[in-house]
Amino acid sequence: MKVLIAEDEILERKAMRKFLEDHFDDITVAGEAVNGRTAIELALDKIPDLILMDIKMPGINGMEAIEQIQAKLPDVRFIMVTAYDSFDYAKQAMKFGVKEYILKPGKKEETMEAIGRVKEDINRVKKDKEEHDHTVELAKQLFLSKVIHEEDGIDSLQQELYPAMTAGFFLVIEDRNNEHISITAKEIKQWTFDDVIVNQEEGKQVIVLGVRETRDDVHEVSRLIKRIQLERGDHWFIGGGTLVQTVDKLSRSYYEALLDLQKQKGKTEAAELAQGILEKIRDAVQEGNAQTALTNTLLLMESPEKEMMKEELFYLVKQVMDNQRVERPELVIHELNTDHKWYEFIQNSCQRVISHYQSLDNIERTRQWIDKHIHESISLEDMAEQARLSPAYFSNLFKTTTGENVTDYVTKRRLQRAVALLKEQVYSLKEISSMIGYKDPNYFSRVFKKHYDLSPKQFQKVTLKK
């Protein structure tokens, strides 16, 4: 139970707080007010169950504060605290429903008895309210069930619960991942002026019946769905029925909500299936697996989601080929305006990937050939012929594959061979130059010095000293 103490004397306030905290485990002091105005402000902020109100306070006195607080918080109970044992005060307090008062300085037993009586009264009222709310909730659930199953007794229940009802609608909610969901009528009422009945006994499906008493806005159903999705995330399917004007048509709104829910689930399942097909095509193109890629392309062309997925497919294939540095077909997406052209596009893409892999194999074989013939005077054309590619494409592909251009590779391999021969101290520079494919010893010396900052002779001397 939350208690507010309104007392202008600080010693009196602190003494009362300590008294309450020492003798009542189930009481929380929610605040202290030094005058009537502060008592009103704190009461509206804290919503206490009980206020201990001093009568004589500066400014707005206790009686005036009680009157203003009760006008806005009729359920709050008061115990009047006064230093005057006056019947006039008691009579005035009774007018506001105040049944207890404590005479200052209060006796411990009398204070505890007064607070105890108020506590009993508050608990009794709470219990009565809970029982009433429970009964009403049972009646609402019965009303919802009877509406759905079109059973007898709907009209009488409607008159009992919603005599001013002018229209109603249904929502049916499920989780996209088939998880248990929970949402209360109190939550939904934050987002609509309509009263709502919520049934979630099944756990995985929530049924909401909206009851309208004053307004007639046909767009409110769709707005409420958007509000729920914004507040709770878009991981729910929410099926909505139309707003109907008579109780006997409410069941129709329920079945419309169910149908809307199933349509959303069907669209999602189709989209997920199409997404899975897209991923299979992407993976197959990446491997150059034309059979799998084309089979799934035909499946996608039969999917109701194909128009939505075509653009994504085009850019997925483009991304795969760009990542692997495969030359793409020179097409723009709007040119693929028939299923057959899509089929040809995927087929061509797979063939290009296969050719690319074959070219990579040729590059490796050619690199091994270069190593064997490094002592010869080999040209770019000779190497491209070994790879069975054009010189320009061979040059580009070699750099893409090995990370260095073909000329640098040949030079590096020749110089590595030269270093080994120089260390042997057996051959002349002219002989070494010829053995690594350079006809001109002077040219060989210039190339060597450029890479090692030493001439071949200087390199030999340094090596000999070591």
Image (spheres, rainbow, N blue to C red):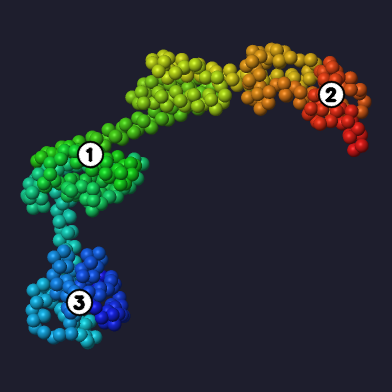
Q: Which residue is mark 1?
A: 222
- Using the image as rendered, state which of residue 308 and residue 400 is in the foreground: 400
Q: Which residue is mark 3?
A: 58
Amino acid bearing label 2: Ser
- Using the image as rendered, state which of residue 436 and residue 33 is in the foreground: 33
Residue drawn at point x = 76 percent, y = 23 percent:
411
Q: Describe the element under mark 3 as helix, strand or loop.
A: loop
**Residue 79 visible, this angle:** no
Where residue 38 appears, as percent x and y from the top left, is 23, 70
Residue drawn at point x = 56 percent, y = 22 percent:
326
Front position among marks 2 and 3: 3
Front position among marks 3 and 1: 3
Residue 327 vertical placement versus 150 (above, below): above
CA gap between label 2 and label 3 equals: 108 Å
Q: Describe the element under mark 1 as helix, strand or loop.
A: helix
CA gap between label 2 and label 1 equals: 83 Å
Where residue 117 appears, as percent x and y from the top left, is 18, 77
Q: Describe the element under mark 2 as helix, strand or loop.
A: helix
Q: Are marks 3 and 1 in contact (CB under 8 Å)?
A: no
Front position among marks 2 and 1: 2
Q: Is residue 10 left or right of residue 89?
A: right
Q: Which residue is mark 2?
A: 445
